[in-house]
């Protein structure tokens, strides 16, 4: 006996968008609720090999496995299989995409498998579990892709610089802006897998995008970054100051070097980037500074960080007044606790403790996502926010 599931949903969005978003494996943790991480291990032609990891279960165990996936854009089908089968004797997956008669895309997800003897569930039990979870994931995918479709190309023709765009909130802003039609330049300080996967994702997204190495706390690097924006894009319509640094430190141990580094890597870096890119900004453009809710609620071990984030709000307000006559808007977005890969890098028990604690602080009972923050930023740089300036928008679930 073997197990088989067959589930489908209609997504009210263009085929290209549905296909691109659901086949962007590196971004699956933002598309599926069950995946904590997706690591690209290799590519061979159209086939991608990758490792998926789930969020820790009730015992703190993190389950992960290697799979390979081959999309065929001509037939709009995808075949996949688990390479590391775990409790499965085998697991083969097929995705089918077709234009729905009433509009949108009918996306079908088929799974054929058999369980190993001694596995926690038999074929029937796993079939029931997969059917329940697949329905949940398909509804999430539908909601997220349709949200992207409604946003459409709201930033079509706009040129953005997003600092610190290879990880976390910055990465979410970069990808959301590119998918919304903007040409995006971003920067990183340290090379690594996050940079490589970002470059791959942007390569598959229409537009002119660049990922450059630059330390925005260094004036020479900022000059080089701004020159690259001017050379490739001719100017800018928005600057998003996202890059920042923070190392927790008790106040009685906070020395002048750490204080200065926090100031330089956050407030001074924002000043350097904004001042240097100002000649590239014209009437109708905007600057968005990424602040933090902790500037208003306080944080033990973060006096230096909350100080510079509080200063950023004052800087934003004053710049809005000074640049307003030139038609340039300046705003701050202050996220609360956001679920990024930084949590996944903690020991499992500590990560779960922090997730539970911070979720309990929010009126919505959950952590924020990078997409929550990205949507606020996209609104501010779009033509929907032409009379919004000098504001500090909290994206924190009401902590």
Image (tube, helix red, strand yellow):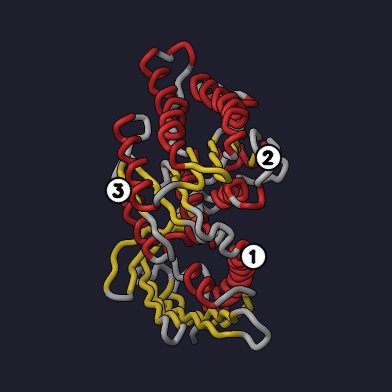
* Image depth: mark 3 or mark 1 in front: 1
Residue linked to disc 1: 150
Instruction: Assess whether mark 1 and mark 3 are in contact (beta carbons under 8 angstroms).
Output: no
First-in-chain label (3 vs 1): 1
- The answer to which quarter of the image holds residue 52 is bottom left
The location of residue 279, given as percent across then percent down, is: 44, 38
First-in-chain label (1 vs 2): 1
Quadrant where the C terminus lies?
A: top right
Q: Nearer the viewer, residue 137 or 88?
A: 137
The location of residue 37, given as percent across then percent down, is: 44, 55
How far is mark 3 from mark 1, CA to CA?
33 Å
Q: SS of the residue at dot 2?
A: loop
How far is mark 3 from mark 2, CA to CA?
33 Å
Q: SS of the residue at dot 3?
A: loop
- Image disc number at residue 362: 2
Residue linked to disc 3: 192
How far is mark 1 from mark 2, CA to CA?
27 Å
Q: Nearer the viewer, residue 340 or 19?
A: 19
Left or right: residue 258 compared with residue 1: left
């Amino acid at each position: 006996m073997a197990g088989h599931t067959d589930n489908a949903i209609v997504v009210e969005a263009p085929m290209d968008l549905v296909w691109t978003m659901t086949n962007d494996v590196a971004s699956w943790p933002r598309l599926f609720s069950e995946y904590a991480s997706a690591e690209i291990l290799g590519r061979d032609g159209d086939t991608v090999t990758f490792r998926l990891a789930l969020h820790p279960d009730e015992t703190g165990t993190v389950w992960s496995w290697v799979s390979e996936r081959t999309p065929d854009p001509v037939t709009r089908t995808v075949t996949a299989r688990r390479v590391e089968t775990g409790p499965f004797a085998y697991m083969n997956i097929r995705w089918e995409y077709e234009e729905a008669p009433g509009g949108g895309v009918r996306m079908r997800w088929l799974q054929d498998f058999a369980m190993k003897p001694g596995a926690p569930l038999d074929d029937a039990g796993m079939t029931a579990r997969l059917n329940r979870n697949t329905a949940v994931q398909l509804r999430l995918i539908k909601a997220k892709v349709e949200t992207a479709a409604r946003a459409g190309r709201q930033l079509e023709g706009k040129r953005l610089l997003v600092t610190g765009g290879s990880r976390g909130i910055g990465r979410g802003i970069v990808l959301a802006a590119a998918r919304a039609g903007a040409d995006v330049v971003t920067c990183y300080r340290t090379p690594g897998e996050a940079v490589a996967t970002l470059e791959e994702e942007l390569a598959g997204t229409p537009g002119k995008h660049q990922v450059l190495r630059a330390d925005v706390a260094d004036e020479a690097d900022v000059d080089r970054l701004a020159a690259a924006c001017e050379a490739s894009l001719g100017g800018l319509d928005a600057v998003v100051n996202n890059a920042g640094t923070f190392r927790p430190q008790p106040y009685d141990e906070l020395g002048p070097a750490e204080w200065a580094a926090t100031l330089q890597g956050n407030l001074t870096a924002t000043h350097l980037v904004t001042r240097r890119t100002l000649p590239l900004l014209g009437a109708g453009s905007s600057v968005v500074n990424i602040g933090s809710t902790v500037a208003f609620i306080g944080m033990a071990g973060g006096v230096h960080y909350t100080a510079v984030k509080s200063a950023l709000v004052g800087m934003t307000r004053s710049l809005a007044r000074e640049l307003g006559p030139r038609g340039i808007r300046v705003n701050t977005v202050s996220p609360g606790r956001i679920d990024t890969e930084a949590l996944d890098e903690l020991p499992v028990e500590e990560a779960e403790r922090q997730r539970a604690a911070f979720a309990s602080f929010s009126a919505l009972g959950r952590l924020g996502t990078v997409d929550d923050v990205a949507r606020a930023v996209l609104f501010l740089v779009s033509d929907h926010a032409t009379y919004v300036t000098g504001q500090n928008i909290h994206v924190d679930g009401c902590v």
